[in-house]
Amino acid sequence: MILKNKRTRKTLNMTLSEFKIHFAKEIKTAFESYKQTELAKPYFKIKNIDENDFYFDLQWNFNHHACSNWYIEKI
């Protein structure tokens, strides 16, 4: 996966497991934001959202829900 810094334009190339280790705090923030957004939808009946739902579209969810200077450019 290729990550890019919004400010410095520095690029990182790492595996998913390395990404989970280095960006654990940002992933947690993004997942909590994703969960709140999904639960706020009126048609959404499932009360328990797991991480698989989040990782299904990791690039979009991380880029839009994490408050990070890094974004996933390509998986």
Image (cartoon, rainbow, N blue to C red):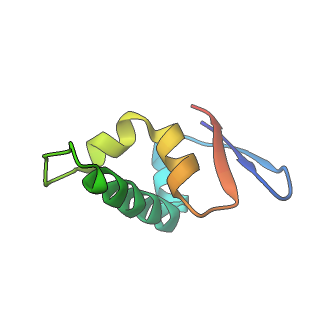
Q: Position of residue 59 (x, y in %)?
A: 53, 39
Q: Position of residue 68 (x, y in %)?
A: 63, 62
Q: Tell which residue pokes out farthest to the right in this image.
A: 8
The mark tally for this picture is 0
Residue at image location 36% in from the left, 63% down from the top = 32
Side of 2 relative to 59 (left or right): right
Side of 23 relative to 35 (left or right): right
Q: Quadrant of the N terminus?
A: top right
Residue at image location 83% in from the left, 59% down from the top = 7
Tell me which corner region of the image, top left, top right, bottom left or bottom right, holds residue 53: top left
Q: Is residue 18 visible?
A: no
Q: Position of residue 52 (x, y in %)?
A: 28, 42
Residue at image location 15% in from the left, 54% down from the top = 48
Relative to residue 74, is residue 31 depicted above or below?
A: below
Relative to residue 20, is residue 55 depicted above or below?
A: above
Q: Quadrant of the C terminus?
A: top right
Side of 33 relative to 38 (left or right): right
Comparing 62 with 12, the one in front is: 62
Q: Position of residue 14 (x, y in %)?
A: 61, 42
Relative to residue 19, is residue 56 depicted above or below?
A: above
Comparing 26 with 37, the one in front is: 37
Residue at image location 13% in from the left, 47% down from the top = 46
Relative to residue 62, is residue 23 depicted above or below?
A: below
Q: Is residue 39 visible?
A: yes
Comparing 56 with 33, the one in front is: 33
Q: Tell which residue pokes out farthest to the top in this image.
A: 75
